Image: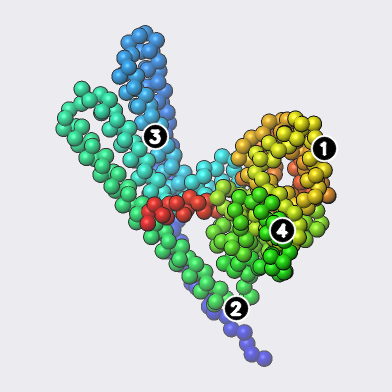
Amino acid sequence: MQAITRDPSPPTTTLGYALFATRWLQAPLYFGLVAAQGVYVYKFFNELWALILRCITGQATETYVMLAVLKLVDVVMIANLLIMVIVGGYETFVSRIGLQGHRDQPEWLSHVNSNVLKVKLATAIVGISSVHLLQMFVDVHHTARHSLLWGTVIHMAFIVSAAILAYMSGPMAAHAERAHHRDHRDHRADDPEPARPSAAVPIPAQAGPPPAETGAEERIRAAGFPARKALEEFDAEHPRAFDRETVARLGKLDFVAAHGNVVFVGPPGIGKTHLAVGLGVRACQAGRRVLFDTAAGWAARLAGAQSAGRLTEELTALDDCPLLIVDEVGYVPLDAATSRLFFQLVAHRYERGSLIVTSDRPLDRWDEVFGGPAAPAMVDRLAHHAEIVRLEGESYRMRRATSEWAG
């Protein structure tokens, strides 16, 4: 019997661990910045109180009020810069904060890194410099000529440096991402264990007759999709967390036959609508009628039917569509009356027809969207026979716009 040989484990690098642990020396620095944030809070309310007193006593001129307001804006912008450095810097250089799923998680924190942080800091500094320069122009009669000149030169230097930094960060981020994917591929190639399907592998195409032979094009046009999307065209490398196997299984459309539901949850720009439309297009190609609209569009449709006294007839007519897609739930809060209409839609289709819903928040937070007591009962029926697919990552549109601007 041949002995199984294993590669020796790499030696424990005590010195490396000790050096890495020195990152915690930065933690007191960030808490010191928190104290500085408190100083700016005190300064803000001190300036605000002085402005209020002068306005009440009639001593505030128009120029004084404008300068005082600009000073308050300046304090707020510096405080925002501090928050960005405190939270983003600690997350990047010291330790993860673990805010995933928190209702107040900043949008930029989900994709923060050293390059993003530098660009955001540079743009914040440009904004602060703009406020300072505006203060000089407002009070130009009391500003020395050389101060105005040097203030303009320094502000332009900030703008140029921020533009150069943004230009350089684009290629640097792209290079780092390519290196990450290359290392990931090399790791899979050296791994003797069977590899799981990679996110880079496209979602399998649907087998079946060509759309032209089945009348699918007419159904696709009648569905009202905002654009035609295919599941196999979905950029599966973009989301940071993405259950490809579940979406591939949903692509077989068994959930439509079983009158099940699908809920895509994730931040804006992550691909939820693409996946929903891709499933809808496949359903059309499989011979099923589909209707697509945003949550606001469905709300208007149901409200119009109710005002016309034909809500029951409208819900019954929708039974002819095995699949309805409700996009962008959570982007616009709905009042109690509209929430009751959505509850009637979900309750009417319960175990009778399928729904695909996209939302920027999980089901247990839908009470933030739907007013009144309808949300829990609606969520209960929707989730009973549902696949919940969560996507995590940064906005594809924002990443593309940033890359184009920087490149």
Find residue 150 and report its horizontal and vertical position in percent: 20, 36
Instruction: Give the residue pinned by disc 1.
Output: 312
At 82% across and 43% down in the image, what residue appears? 316
Find residue 386 and report its horizontal and vertical position in percent: 75, 52
The residue carrying pointer 4 sits among few (fewer than 14), some (14 to 19) or many (20 or more) residues within 10 Å by Cα, namely: many
Q: Which mark is residue 197?
A: none
Question: Which secondary structure lies at badge 3?
Answer: helix
Instruction: Give the residue pinned by disc 3.
Output: 77
Residue 40 drawn above or below residue 216: above
Question: Which secondary structure lies at badge 1?
Answer: helix
Q: Pick whichever, 192 or 337, lies toward us.
A: 337
Task: Left or right? Give the position of 93 relative to 255.
Answer: left
Distance of mark 1 from mark 3, alpha carbons? Answer: 53 Å
Distance of mark 2 from mark 1, alpha carbons? Answer: 60 Å
- Quadrant of the image occupied by residue 86: top left
Q: Mark 4 or mark 1: name the one nearer the start of the chain.
A: 4
Q: Mark 3 or mark 4: name the one nearer the start of the chain.
A: 3
**Which is closer to the viewer, label 3 or label 4?**
4
Instruction: Give the residue pinned by disc 2.
Output: 192
At 75% across and 54% down in the image, what residue appears? 289
Find residue 369 and report its horizontal and vertical position in percent: 66, 37
Instruction: Give the residue pinned by disc 4.
Output: 284
